[in-house]
Amino acid sequence: MEKGVEVLSITTDEAAELIGVSARTVRRACERGEIQAVKVQGRWRVIREALLNQFGAPEDR
């Protein structure tokens, strides 16, 4: 990724890694509206900033 480019949304796999749960858990939370996300071409994209605000920023990443 280029420096200076902010990622606005991430995949469920990336979100799962950030918060320490499975991608399936993230997808279920998206479906229930517990995690702010949108569906793009049939796949969930998690709003990165909202996820970090909700669960806290990971240490040293």
Image (spheres, rainbow, N blue to C red):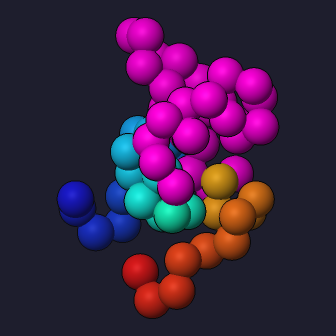
Residue 6: tell me if it is visible.
no
Residue 35 in the figure: left or right of residue 14: right
Q: Residue 57: name its quadrant.
A: bottom right
Residue lying at the far bottom in this picture: please name it: 60
Total marks shown come to 0
Inspect the magenta stretch and tell me whether residue 49 lies in it: yes
Tell whether 53 sits left or right of 26: right
**Residue 35 placed where, x, y %?**
70, 40
The image shows residue 24 at horizontal and vertical percentages of 48, 35
Foreground of the two, 32 or 47: 32
Q: Residue furthest top?
A: 41
Say which residue appears at 62% left-offset and 29% top-offset: 28
- The stretch of residues the image draws in magenta is 21-50
The C terminus: image quadrant? bottom left
Residue 4 forms part of the magenta stretch: no
Above or below, 42 against 55 in this view is above
Residue 28 versus residue 11 in the image, above or below: above
Q: Is 43 displayed left or right of 57 in the figure?
A: left
**Of 25 and 37, the residue lying toward us:** 25
Residue sitting at x 36%, y 58%: 5
In this picture, is 22 found above or below 2?
A: above
Residue, x 70% and y 64% (percent of image)? 55
Residue 61 visible in this rendered orientation of the protein: yes
Q: Quadrant of the N terminus?
A: bottom left
Relative image position of residue 12 (x, y in whole percent): 45, 39
Judged from this view, the residue extending furthest toward the left is 1
Which corner quadrant of the image does residue 17 belong to?
bottom left
Left or right of residue 18, residue 2 in this image: left
